Amino acid sequence: MVEEIPSKVITATREVFETMFYATVEAQPDEEGNRESLSQSISSWIAGEIRFEGRYCGRMIFFVPTELALTMASNFMGLEVEAVSSSQARDVVGELCNMVCGNLFSKLDRREVWTLAPPQTWENSEPFIGSDGSPPTVSIPLCIEGYPVQLEIRLTPAGGEEKRNGYG
Amino acid sequence: MAYNVLIVDDSQTMRKVIRKTVSLSGFEIGDCWEAGNGKEALDILHSCWVDLILTDLNMPVMNGLEMLKELMRDEIYRNIPVVLITTEGSESRIGEAYALGIKGYIQKPFYPETIRDVLSRVMEGAHG
């Protein structure tokens, strides 16, 4: 099942963005250096994280440029971008995580019961710095409406706790 | 015919989106109330007449299944049609919700047409 995650999460992400945010999603090659170049190209971003438990435990994290998050909230809620608050933009990133995660698990196995925690979001005006060095289980660079977005899934090893990184 | 609707979801943003999408779908809304969890929803029901409940499953304080159980215990509330709008996709949880009396299920993300079709069918069944 783990090997199915990358293709299915991209499909789930596309469905969510096209249905709810009226945006197109392109998967980018996960080449070495993409994650670092992402951190350098974004000066302000919103991160959304959702923890899950089921056959696998772990978390899904989206890193979204603040500008894109504001546009997403504008499309999602039918507001002008100028009328979107930062809390609404964060809420929308949290909902993004919720919908993609739920959609992903429906595609992986509907017989399995997956428990999703409430999503957490945070803002950072500093360029994203790489984590504690441990690589995510799945790392997918995306291009959404011309903006770079990073999607990561970190699975908890069986019998152990996931090592937290430094961003939240 | 306009229906009084209660939207239950812990995300204020999602509640607004659901309300907007329901309106855009052509489904006529009369009064519309919002609740952040099942307990808040039950409090609203004590004082407001509701024709239809749209609810998420995973919420703090009182989740959707717990709210459904409370609704089933009441002679009046158990007759209000309930439609799930949720990211939840597991067959067992959705089956549990149907056993507790929901009339429809919409998985997020959703198109306005899906909302329209499900709500129209549910309300025709409730009043037919």
Image: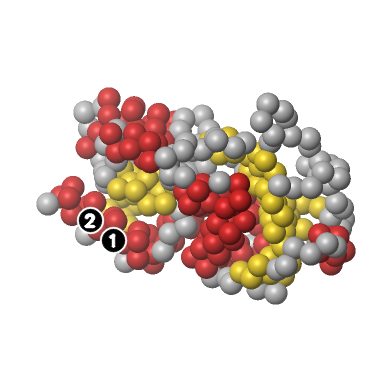
Query: Is residue A3 positioned above or below B96 on the image?
Result: below
Query: Residue B87: x and y, percent?
Result: 47, 48
Q: Check disc 1 and give the amino acid type.
A: Asp
Q: Quadrant of residue A156?
A: top right
Q: Chain of mark 2?
A: B
Query: Residue A63: x and y, percent?
Result: 72, 56
Q: Callout 2: 10 Å neighbours few (<14), some, many (20+)?
A: few
Which residue is at 29% across, 38% downward? B98
The residue positioned farthest toward the left in the image shown: B128
Residue at disc 2, secondary structure: helix
Q: Check disc 2 and give the amino acid type.
A: Arg
Which residue is at 81% across, 59% downward? A35
Which residue is at 78% across, 42% downward? A168
Q: Which residue is mark 1?
A: B117
Relative to B102, A17 lies left or right: right
Query: Residue A117: x and y, percent?
Result: 59, 37
Q: Are marks 2 and 1 in contact (CB under 8 Å)?
A: yes
Relative to B115, A13 lies left or right: right
Residue A150 in sight: yes
Give the CA separation, mark 2 to mark 1: 6 Å
Query: Residue A115: x and y, percent?
Result: 53, 36
Tag on residue B121? Answer: 2
Q: Chain of mark 1?
A: B
Which residue is at 25% across, 58% downward? B120
Image quadrant occupied by the N terminus of chain B: bottom left
